[in-house]
């Protein structure tokens, strides 16, 4: 009975504990080769104020929901990045950021509680979910970063025009945002929804789609930017 349960679980992805967990990602991630950091250093050299993202105080959260006739055998998930990096040129009204995909974290208890998910997958199940996400869905070996370029969507800064490059595809969205001036910098927060298929990603599924991940994803973010280059992220 136990062997049979493990086999069924492996097929539907409900108990990835039947497979060994992936290695822990490296603590640091180099910037993408084409990331325009030099643009911002040049802007600062010309006397313009340049802000940098504080990864320790910034957060991106994506809620991933299950679907299919066997959805009750799976879990909804919360995927987060605590490693958003990049720069803002306020005078030009432009920012460039990147997210190392291999630094994504899956199903932190606090974030699951915020999403009102009343279950907590086992550590092995979480590692299995993360492995499937990176290897089978995002193909992070070929596409290791999400790149984000944002510019002012309107004069009062209540919206940003955001261009996202993910999985080799680029899409642009108009996103309402809230901006908050803090003693240590500026915080920008907002929410958006998008489909995985917008970026050529096939939502993960097994058993002919009887258990699958919904195409739609819900994303929220809070990005804190500060002045200067002194606090280089590790």
Image (tube, grey):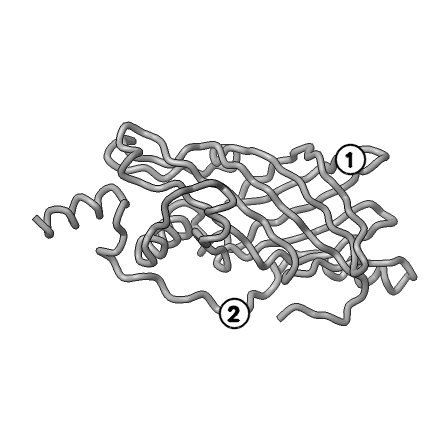
Which residue in the rendered view is the most extreme toward the right?
Answer: 47
- Please give left or right for residue 212 compared with residue 58 in the image: left
Above or below: residue 200 compared with residue 84: above
Above or below: residue 62 compared with residue 159: below
Above or below: residue 171 compared with residue 92: above
Q: Secondary structure at mark 1?
A: loop
Residue 28 image point, x, y percent: 55, 68
Q: Residue at x 82, y 45 (%)?
A: 93
Residue 130 image point, x, y percent: 39, 53
Name the foreground residue: 151 vs 18. 18
- Give the Cα distance between marks 1 and 2: 35 Å
Name the foreground residue: 6 vs 22. 6
- Please give left or right for residue 18 compared with residue 32 in the image: left
| Residue for badge 2 | 27
- Which circle marks residue 158 in the picture? 1
Q: Residue at x 27, y 61 (%)?
A: 20
- Please give left or right for residue 216 compared with residue 213 in the image: right
Quarter of image, res 176: top right
């Amino acid at each position: 009975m136990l062997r049979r349960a493990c086999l069924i679980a492996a097929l539907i992805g409900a108990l990835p504990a039947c497979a060994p967990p992936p290695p822990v990602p490296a603590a640091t991630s180099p910037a993408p080769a084409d990331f325009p950091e030099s643009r911002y250093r040049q802007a600062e050299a010309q006397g313009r104020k340049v802000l940098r993202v504080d990864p320790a105080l910034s957060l991106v959260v994506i809620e991933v929901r299950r679907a299919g006739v066997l959805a009750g055998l799976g879990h909804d998930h919360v995927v987060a990045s605590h490693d958003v990096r990049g720069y803002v040129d306020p005078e030009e009204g432009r920012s460039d950021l990147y997210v190392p995909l291999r630094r994504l974290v899956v199903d932190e208890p606090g974030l699951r509680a915020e999403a009102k998910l009343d279950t907590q997958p086992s550590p092995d199940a979480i590692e299995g979910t993360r492995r499937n996400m990176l290897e089978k869905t995002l193909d992070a070996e070929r596409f290791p970063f999400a790149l984000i370029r944002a510019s002012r969507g309107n004069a009062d800064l209540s919206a940003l025009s955001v261009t996202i490059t993910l999985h080799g595809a680029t899409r642009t969205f108009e996103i309402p945002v809230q901006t908050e001036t803090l003693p240590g910098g500026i915080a920008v927060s907002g929410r958006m929804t998008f489909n995985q298929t917008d970026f050529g990603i096939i939502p993960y599924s097994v058993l002919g789609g009887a258990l699958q991940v919904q195409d739609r994803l819900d994303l929220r973010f809070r990005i804190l930017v500060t002045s200067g280059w002194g606090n280089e992220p590790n």
